[in-house]
Image (cartoon, grey):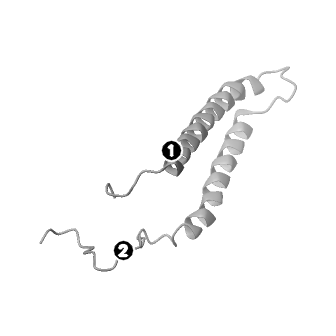
Amino acid sequence: MDRLPWAKWYWLVVVGLGAVWILDGLEVTIVGTIASRLTEEGSGIELTSSQIGSAAAIYVAGACLGALPEAQVDGGGDGERDLGNVEGEDSSPIER
């Protein structure tokens, strides 16, 4: 893997994923902060703690279920990929 060339495209992917990771962490922080305020009397919505917990569980379940089709598209879930071995190149990890 370390012999593959590093292209501009990879920087775009790394920066994009980093930005999404930061936004996801920010989302969790904001929801965690607001959730306790929603249970207070006079908040306008007055949810119970169990309703907030159920909403959080549904959110996580939806995120997990939404990731399943992507995993299937991304390689069938077998964990192995053909990286396009160049003909004549030895693909075994053992030095000879």
Residue located 49% across and 49% down the image:
10
The correct choice, above or below, for 44 with respect to 87 in the image is above
Quadrant of the frame with the C terminus: bottom left
* Label disc, if present, on residue 33 of the rendered structure: none
Residue located 25% across and 75% down the image:
90
Badge 1 amino acid: Trp
Name which quarter of the figure residue 91 lies in. Answer: bottom left
Characterize the local packing of mark 2: few (<14), some (14-19) or many (20 or more) Cα atoms within 10 angstroms.
few
Quadrant of the frame with the N terminus: bottom left
Badge 2 amino acid: Asn
Characterize the local packing of mark 1: few (<14), some (14-19) or many (20 or more) Cα atoms within 10 angstroms.
few
Q: Disc 2 on helix, strand or loop?
A: loop
Determine contact: label 1, label 2, CB under 8 Å.
no
**Does residue 35 appear to the left or right of 68 in the view shown?**
right
User: Which of these two is toward me, 20 or 94?
Assistant: 94
Asked if residue 83 can be seen in this view, the reply is: yes
The correct choice, above or below, for 42 with respect to 32 in the image is above
Residue located 51% across and 47% down the image:
8
User: Which of these two is toward me, 18 or 11?
Assistant: 11
Q: Disc 1 on helix, strand or loop?
A: helix
How far across and down, in percent of the image, does residue 76 sit? Answer: 52, 73
Asked if residue 39 can be seen in this view, the reply is: no
The correct choice, above or below, for 30 with respect to 78 in the image is above
How far across and down, in percent of the image, does residue 45 sit? Answer: 85, 30
How far across and down, in percent of the image, does residue 49 sit? Answer: 70, 33
**Does residue 84 appear to the left or right of 15 in the view shown?**
left
**Does residue 7 appear to the left or right of 70 in the view shown?**
left
Name which quarter of the figure residue 15 lies in. Answer: top right
User: Which residue in the rendered view is the most extreme toward the left?
Assistant: 96
Task: Name the residue that disc number 2 marks.
Answer: 85
Task: Name the residue that disc number 1 marks.
Answer: 11
